């Protein structure tokens, strides 16, 4: 059974929905700003689910009042990395939370080859399973170029 | 069941409905009065008239701008906006005038007016000087300027003493870089923020002369006139009323004489000098009351400035000698 027939990475919020339009992204960002979150832009070309820490694109943006600033940074990031995964993250600095409160992907490569299942034989007849992203067969910055 | 608002990727379902535009607030208005009523702009304008003494040309200019924005709104309601895109007029301004003529105060009011009219989305003011925009080493300026710009988006960016951004004596000064980034954003993201440059008249003029690009991108050059003696007295009255003080018998006349002398002296900073003079008068009033330890002080004693509190000023001694 294929659980994800379209072969799209599903990480973070809204990832089973079609890509958000810029207007929808702006509304999400405004919602987060209204809650006092600090937004940041991150990108990667290694979409393995355990790759938690993506590369930061600039500093997290504190003290913003309007989504236009975040959108400006996102536009810059899209221009620089058109074929990478880009996500927006909202950091909630409230005491007791101090963690990421929202996170969603806003840019994807044109083609997403997905993951393969890797079987490793170990002691006895045991088998270890892991997933492997086809994209990472290529060196960094050459993934998703085609 | 009704159709879901989303579509599953890969299926040929219909596209999700676009988010509703939040233009509903002033949509449908057909007369100036309707727009005014909906945006409550009149209240801010009246407040401006009431709270700020003098500044007639400034107020007139603000009224003109507000009128233009109201008419634009009406035109948009009738579908007269050019090619569907909002023809946002350029509203970047430069405030020139001597110290203490109310540039910062007016900037705060303008932000509120623009917000009520829906020209800026949030209506906050980010007030910065050269230090907040220009970095200390190569590669420091651009991120710093951009960070400030991002904070100001949706509101008003107020750059005080903007002429410091440009230092002609040092051609490798990083200020030029900040100016270039500013210009770019001022041009491309007019919908997102309004930039107000402020500074003394003569130095701003040199600044604009050496940065013609900046000058041409600013639509409104507003000059703040100096206050007359009468206006300064009115300002003093208001300042005292705010702090629950008042002039005692003869004190107002004494203060008028004080202003007469002070205005002739160098470094006179209009309303700011008035505030400082009143603060010093309050100090003297306090020591006067402090000296008489046995006396029961009534409310009148505690709120009244006497002529002596003002006449003891250094300004009179300088004028007499």
Image (spheres, rainbow, N blue to C red):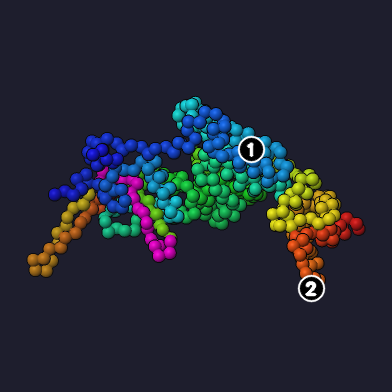
Judging from the image, mark 1 belongs to the subunit labelled B
User: Which of disc 1 and disc 2 is earlier in sequence?
Assistant: 1
Q: Which residue is mark 2?
A: B293
Residue for point 43% across, 54% down:
A35
Residue A95 visible to the viewer:
yes
Q: Position of residue B113 (x, y in %)?
A: 58, 41
Residue lying farthest to the left in this orientation: A125
Circle 1: element type: helix
Residue B208 position in % (x across, y down): 65, 40
Residue extending farthest right: B321
Please say if B50 is above or below B244: above
Name the residue carrying label 1: B62
B296 or A102, which lies in front?
A: B296
Q: Is residue B315 magenta?
A: no
Quarter occupied by residue B275:
bottom right
Q: Considering the image in quadrants, where does the N terminus of chain B appear?
A: top left
User: Looking at the image, which is closer to me, B237 or A65?
Assistant: B237
User: Do circles 2 and 1 both sit on a common chain?
Assistant: yes
Identify the residue at horizontal 57%, vertical 30% (top origin).
Answer: B32
Which residues are the magenta region? A94-113
Q: Residue furthest bottom?
A: B294
Foreground of the two, A62 or A144: A62
């Amino acid at each position: 059974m294929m659980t994800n027939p379209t072969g799209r990475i599903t990480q973070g919020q809204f990832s089973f929905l079609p890509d958000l339009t810029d207007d929808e992204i702006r509304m999400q960002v405004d919602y987060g700003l209204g809650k006092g979150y600090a937004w940041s832009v991150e990108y990667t070309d290694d979409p393995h689910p355990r790759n938690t820490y993506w590369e930061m694109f600039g500093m997290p943006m504190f003290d913003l009042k309007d989504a236009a600033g975040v959108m400006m940074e996102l536009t810059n990031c899209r221009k620089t990395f058109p074929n990478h995964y880009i996500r927006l993250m909202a950091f909630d600095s409230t005491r007791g939370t101090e963690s990421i409160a929202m996170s969603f992907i806003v840019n994807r490569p044109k083609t997403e080859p997905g993951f393969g299942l890797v079987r490793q034989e170990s002691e006895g007849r045991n088998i270890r399973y892991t997933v492997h992203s086809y994209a990472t067969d290529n060196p960094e910055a050459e993934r998703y170029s085609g | 069941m009704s159709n879901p608002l989303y579509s599953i990727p890969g299926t040929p379902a219909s596209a999700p409905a676009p988010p509703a535009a939040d233009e509903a607030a002033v949509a449908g208005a057909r007369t100036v009065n309707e727009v005014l009523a909906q945006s409550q702009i009149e209240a801010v304008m009246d407040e401006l008239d009431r709270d700020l003494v003098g500044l007639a040309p400034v107020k007139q200019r603000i009224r003109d701008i507000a009128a233009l924005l109201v008419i634009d709104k009406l035109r948009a309601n009738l579908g007269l906006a050019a090619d569907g895109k909002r023809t946002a007029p350029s509203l970047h301004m430069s405030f020139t005038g001597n110290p203490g003529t109310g540039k910062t105060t007016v900037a705060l009011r303008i932000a509120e007016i623009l917000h009520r009219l829906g020209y800026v989305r949030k209506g906050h003011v980010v007030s910065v000087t050269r230090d907040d925009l220009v970095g200390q080493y190569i590669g420091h300026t651009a991120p710093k300027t951009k960070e400030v710009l991002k904070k100001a988006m949706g509101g008003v960016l107020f750059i005080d003493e903007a002429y410091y951004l440009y230092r002609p004596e040092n051609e490798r000064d990083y200020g030029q870089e900040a100016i270039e980034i500013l210009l770019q954003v001022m041009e491309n993201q007019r919908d997102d923020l309004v930039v107000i440059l402020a500074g003394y008249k003569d130095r701003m003029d040199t600044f604009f002369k050496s940065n013609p690009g900046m000058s041409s991108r600013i639509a409104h050059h507003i000059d703040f006139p100096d206050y007359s003696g009468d206006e300064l007295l009115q300002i003093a009255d208001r300042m005292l009323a705010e702090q629950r003080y008042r002039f005692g018998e003869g004190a107002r006349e004494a203060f008028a004489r004080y202003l007469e002398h002070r205005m002739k002296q160098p470094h006179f900073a209009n309303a700011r000098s008035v505030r400082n003079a009143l603060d010093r008068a309050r100090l003297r009033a306090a020591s006067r009351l402090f000296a008489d330890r046995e006396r029961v002080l009534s409310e009148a004693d505690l709120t009244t400035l006497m002529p002596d509190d003002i006449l003891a000023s250094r300004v009179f001694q300088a004028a007499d000698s």
